[in-house]
């Protein structure tokens, strides 16, 4: 087969497989947060550079003294990016439900990133409240993408409730430690049928690539780009990391072995190895 | 006049004022907002018919950057 044909076949195969989350479809497997950027201009440049099609935002009280045209969403081209409002900062199911309903009313969109936290130090998900809120939001017709720990049983419970996507943390939010327990991710991927998005913990492009190599459906990150020395360069790196990981997962890696396996043939050597047995 | 709260701060308004009246008075330029009264989300379609009462807790929210 001609080289160009081979290349086209692989790229078409991967490109023709958009990520489906509920009734929504995405060509990019990288989802980006919009927090912690130095300026809105920098944030917009990073969204553009990353190729993302889904960006997270948070719901907060309007500053009543601010009479400027201050809508944060004015900075984001809504024809290019789908908005995924989160319930970040909520510590109870009740508050997460309030936040989700407000977001749906403001945006006329049922997408929600459900995030119920347990405490400010770990920012780990509160499992009981997360389950409780997920069940109600699914019943109310939301497309629920739920932040959870990497516990496979919790992931299964959430999938059983009918969430659109399970989003296990690779490591704690903003910690940049990458995927700390790849085996849990593997078990989650074997256990549930809805898309699995690694949400939180990604620190650099190799973390995103590794996550994708495990076979997850996408990566959601914020701090790693927003707080990099050069956020736009990191946004590009993340885009390439996600693509590299996805192609590698498709390609199928060679098994790891203890001993070497020469790439050059042993036949035809002018001098034999002094230690050959 | 009636007393209620908006985003946790005390607010004094005219008796009989609706949520739509309040939003006009607040003169917010935000495009995409949502309103909650006493922890119940209001549909935009009832802003003009929902009359605020003494002691109501009103929340007006919008979006900010987040992860």
Image (cartoon, coloured by chain):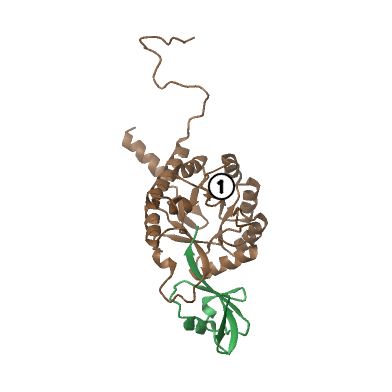
From the viewer's side, name the closer residue of A11 and A273. Answer: A273
Residue A115 placement: quadrant: bottom right
Height in image: A224 above or below A268? Answer: below
Where does residue B30 sit, x and y in percent of width and height? 44, 73
Going 48% across and 84% down the picture, which residue do you hit?
B25
Q: Quadrant of the N terminus of chain A?
A: top left
Would you call the spot at circle 1 few (<14 residues within 10 Å), some (14-19), or many (20 or more)?
A: many
Going 51% across and 28% down the picture, which residue do you hit?
A256
Where does residue B39 sit, x and y in percent of width and height? 62, 73
Chain where mark 1 sits: A
Where does residue A226 sit, x and y in percent of width and height? 44, 54
- In the figure, the shade used to draw chain A is brown
Where does residue B64 sit, x and y in percent of width and height? 48, 65
Going 39% across and 44% down the picture, which residue do you hit?
A12
Q: Is residue A219 visible?
A: yes
* Chain coloured green in this rendering: B
Reading the image, the residue beneath label 1 is: A171
From the viewer's side, name the closer residue of A126 and A155. Answer: A126
């Amino acid at each position: 087969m001609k080289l160009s044909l081979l290349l086209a076949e692989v790229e078409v195969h991967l490109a023709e497989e958009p990520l489906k989350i509920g009734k929504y479809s995405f060509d990019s497997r990288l989802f980006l947060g919009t927090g912690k950027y130095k300026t809105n201009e920098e944030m917009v440049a990073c969204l553009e550079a990353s190729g993302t099609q889904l960006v997270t935002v948070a719901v907060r009280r309007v500053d009543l003294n601010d009479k400027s045209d201050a809508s944060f969403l004015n900075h984001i081209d809504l024809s290019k990016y789908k908005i995924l409002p989160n319930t970040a900062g909520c510590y109870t199911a009740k508050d997460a439900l309030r936040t989700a309903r407000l977001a749906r009313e403001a945006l006329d969109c049922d997408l929600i990133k459900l995030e119920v936290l347990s405490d400010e130090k770990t920012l780990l998900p509160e499992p009981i409240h997360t389950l409780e809120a997920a069940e109600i939001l699914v019943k109310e017709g939301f497309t629920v993408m739920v932040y959870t720990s990497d516990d496979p049983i919790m992931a299964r419970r959430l999938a059983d409730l009918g969430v659109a996507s399970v989003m296990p943390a690779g490591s704690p939010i903003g910690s940049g430690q990458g995927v700390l327990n790849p085996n849990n991710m593997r078990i989650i991927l074997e256990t549930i049928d809805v898309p699995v998005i690694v949400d939180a913990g990604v620190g650099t492009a190799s973390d995103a690539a590794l996550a994708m190599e495990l076979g997850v459906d996408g990566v959601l990150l914020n701090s790693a780009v927003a707080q990099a020395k050069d956020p736009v360069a990191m946004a590009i790196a993340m885009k390439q990391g996600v693509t590299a990981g996805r192609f590698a997962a498709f390609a199928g890696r060679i098994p790891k072995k203890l001993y070497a396996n020469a790439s050059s043939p042993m036949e035809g050597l002018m001098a034999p190895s002094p230690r050959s047995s | 006049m009636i007393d209620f709260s908006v985003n946790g701060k005390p607010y004094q308004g005219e008796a009989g004022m609706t949520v739509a009246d309040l939003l006009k008075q607040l003169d917010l330029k935000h495009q995409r907002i949502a309103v909650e009264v006493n922890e119940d989300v209001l549909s935009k379609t009832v802003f003009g018919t929902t009359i605020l009462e003494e002691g109501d807790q009103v929340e007006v929210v919008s979006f900010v950057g987040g992860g």
